[in-house]
Amino acid sequence: MNYLKGVLFSLVFFAIITIISLWSSYVFRFAPLILIVSVAVTYFLTKQFKLELFQISSSAIYLSLAIAFLVAHPFLFVTPFVDASADPAAHISALAITDSIPETYAPFSYLEYRYQIGFPLLAKMFIDLLPFVSSNFIVWLLGVIFTFLSAILIYTISREFFDDEKAGLIALALFFGSKIIFQNMFWGQYTFILASVFFLATLLTFQKKNKLAYLFFPIIFIAHPGVGFYALIFFGLWTLIYKNYSESLKLFLSGLIALPSFFITYIHFLSNFGNEGIPLTISSLIDNSLIFTLWIGGLIFVLGILGLAFIIYKKDFSKLNLLLISSFIVSGLISILLSASGKILGGRVVELAMFSGLFLSVYFVLKLVNSKQKLFIPAFFLILILSFGLFLTSSQLFPLKSGS
């Protein structure tokens, strides 16, 4: 079964809905028309810009579904159909949208509307078209879908980076041990999840020199400024290492599609950026350096460091390895510095360090399992068990899983 076509169609479909909803909201937003146009445009684009990749294996689908089940479990079984631990901001922001971008969150609040607009616009289209379905359920379900797509993209990127099915499966096993993806879902950080998905989609398509990257890139900025910030870091490093200046310029210019979101979210975000924070101290740097390892996942951190050391020891300085090392170090340092000075942005940039560390971990484990025959299966299950154990025993995730 060709799962890839379905994944690609879904990504393009969600991107087109978001862009059309954003721009039409300045005139008149009409959900049925947005749906029809989005389906037609998605069909055209997926036919026009085919993505040549390995097929997604059934094993990858099952593992990705398992991750989706873990993030869905509290809502379905612990606090049935109540997103108990989630911040309701994304849900309220979606409900506040009418035929245009609202000035306030009325009737829920009369504060000025400043929330990240991408996910609320996307969710609002489905809420309008499915009035018989709980809006809370629609918002939550979209979060589960995007978590599933994140897992699929992690698998696909790893497989493409290292040209090996085993790399993709190792990446998924490690993904179980990443706390960020589960925290984002349990906290209701749907805007962040959406932006992360399109960061990964941009990475995959840009690496494959597919023009869909120019569609996916602006969605990052429409969805969340924090992910937009670390996307600029990553693709800036990419440009310096790969020296593909022309392609990178086109990618950055495609971000202009997100321009309307600047007037909704970014003006307020930038104006408040310097007002938050605490004094930077040696103590706060040490504390946040320790917390950093927990944020990205202990297993990913350890294996990522081993991967970095192995690359240096073997002098395997390919462009990809240089990109992963520089991204891991730069994003890690920025995250620690921002967090230590009380900047919320530090908790966003840490996700880039997690992704980079995960790919470095895959590199290291793949080198080990390819050095001896029949080592992959025991290594894979060991990583999977350790990662799942970290998920089950996490003191950070436990209260969120229980709905508190």
Image (tube, rainbow, N blue to C red):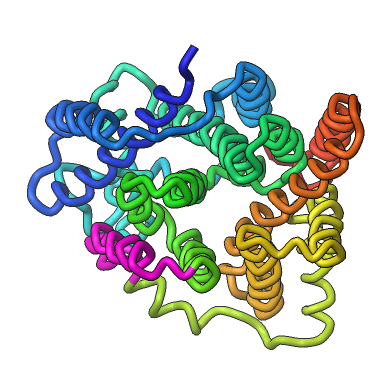
Q: Where residue 389 sits in the image (x, y, percent)?
A: 87, 34
- On the rendered structure, is 368 left or right of 319? right
Q: Relative to residue 296, is residue 309 depicted above or below? A: below
The quarter holding residue 30 reads top left
Tell me the residue at 90%/25% (across/down).
374
Residue at the top extreme, as displayed: 1
Give the magenta range: 243-266
Does residue 79 appear anywhere in the picture?
no
Q: Where residue 234 sits in the image (x, y, percent)?
A: 53, 64
Tell me the residue at 71%/86% (across/down).
280
Task: Give whichever of 231, 111 is nearer the camera.
Answer: 231
Tell me the residue at 25%/45% (across/down).
97
Residue at the left extreme, as displayed: 27
Query: Magenta includes 220?
Result: no
- On the rendered structure, is 262 left or right of 370? left
Task: Give whichever of 377, 384 is nearer the camera.
Answer: 377
Q: Main secondary structure of the magenta part?
A: helix
Of the 4 image quadrants, the one containing the C terminus is: top right
Tell me the residue at 88%/32% (across/down).
379
Query: Magenta includes 253?
Result: yes
